[in-house]
Image (tube, rainbow, N blue to C red):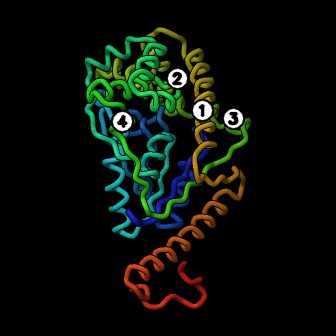
Amino acid sequence: MRGPVVAIMGPTASGKSSLALALAERLGGEIVSADSAQVYRGLDVGTAKPSAADRERVPHHLLDLRDPDQGFSLAEFLSLAGPALEDLHTRGRLPLLVGGTGLYLRGLLEGYTLVEVPPDPNLRRTLEARETPSLLADLQARDPETAGKIDPRNRRRLIRALEVCMQTGRAFSEVSRRVPPDNPRLKLGLRVPREVLAERIDRRLEAMVAGGWVEEVSRLVEKGWGPCLRHLRILGYCEILDVVEGNRPLQEALEEIRLATRRYARRQETWLRAEPGLEWIDFQPALLRAAEERIRRFLEEAQLEAACRDRKESGGAPSGGPPERRNPPCS
């Protein structure tokens, strides 16, 4: 994979998707989703999945890949995302990676290669029945390196790492490796003031309810996927499921979702602050223009680097002829 890739990153409700949509239209791009919730069919409103109109405006990839009763792993994401990027490069389109699943973004951009270990439903049920401290202690004994990297509150990742360890007899860190790709990559992070982000979270939650989130969950329950929603643990769905099943009032559920979403956004911000090479762009009226200008500079730099690489590999000038005088010499 040698073509340029741009990642639009930021906490939930920061406006990543709308920014990427506008950038794709201006830059001849297509959007590759890096969201572990949006891979599920039927989970549309509560995951803020791009609408049919948005997908008509700009092609989107890696959405609606699984039913709610099917698993989906980082290894599966990487196996699908790589070919998607290659296809876009072949067609001369700019890939815009968008999504809130940091591990998916980092795995793809940093070249993670994972051994595919299919989920074991029986083992997973056994692990899910255990308390988090027990899971963490078990993982620390089997794979201290991975245990030190996983947020103890992220039960899904704890369980998956243990599942791989127990099925392969090897540490999760041993069955995965990192080979950084040599293609140009630009990571842009949206920096949104905390009070603005909180307001955006509240407004989006209201829009989700008005847009039929409760009705969406009711349809999923009618299809027999209620237990799957609890298993997936996608933000907000368990609380709305409680409403549909008559176990709690809607306003109580919405307040819990609101607070949980704010906590999730803070965790995402912490993750992003530690993301190597991330360039921050402030949330402001001129956001689109600033992002577009930075990406255009990045693409110009990538084009020059490609010309220099071609020159070095061919032992002479790039295939398209000698570089223009205004370009600096290749180092």
Q: Which residue is mark 3?
A: 199
* Furthest residue in direction top, as rendered: 247
Numbered mark located on residue 267 in the image: 1
In percent of width and height, residue 25 lies at 50, 63
Instruction: Give how far across and how far down residue 196 sits, in percent.
Output: 71, 39
Q: Position of residue 30 (x, y in %)?
A: 43, 59
Residue at the disc numbered 4 = 40
Alpha-carbon distance for marks 2 and 4?
23 Å
* Disc nearer the start of the sequence (1/3): 3
Quick one: SS at disc 3?
A: helix
How far apart are the two marked residues, 1 and 3, measured between alpha carbons?
17 Å
Residue at image mark 2: 153
Q: Amino acid type of disc 4?
A: Tyr
Q: Is residue 63 above or below residue 87?
A: above
Could you tell me if the residues under marks 2 and 1 are in contact, i.e. CB atoms within 8 Å?
yes
Q: Residue at x 72, y 55 (%)?
A: 285
Specify which label sits upstream in the sequence, 2 or 1.
2
Mark closer to the observer (1, 3): 1
Q: Earlier in the sequence, mark 2 or mark 4?
A: 4
Q: Are marks 2 and 4 in contact (CB under 8 Å)?
A: no
Mark in front: 2 vs 3: 2
Q: Nearer the viewer, mark 2 or mark 4?
A: 2
How far apart, in angstroms, are the residues tagged by discs 3 and 4?
Answer: 27 Å
Which residue lies at the image location 47% right of the left edge and 60% below the top edge?
5
Q: Nearer the viewer, mark 4 or mark 1?
A: 1
Residue under the point 46% across and 79% down: 307
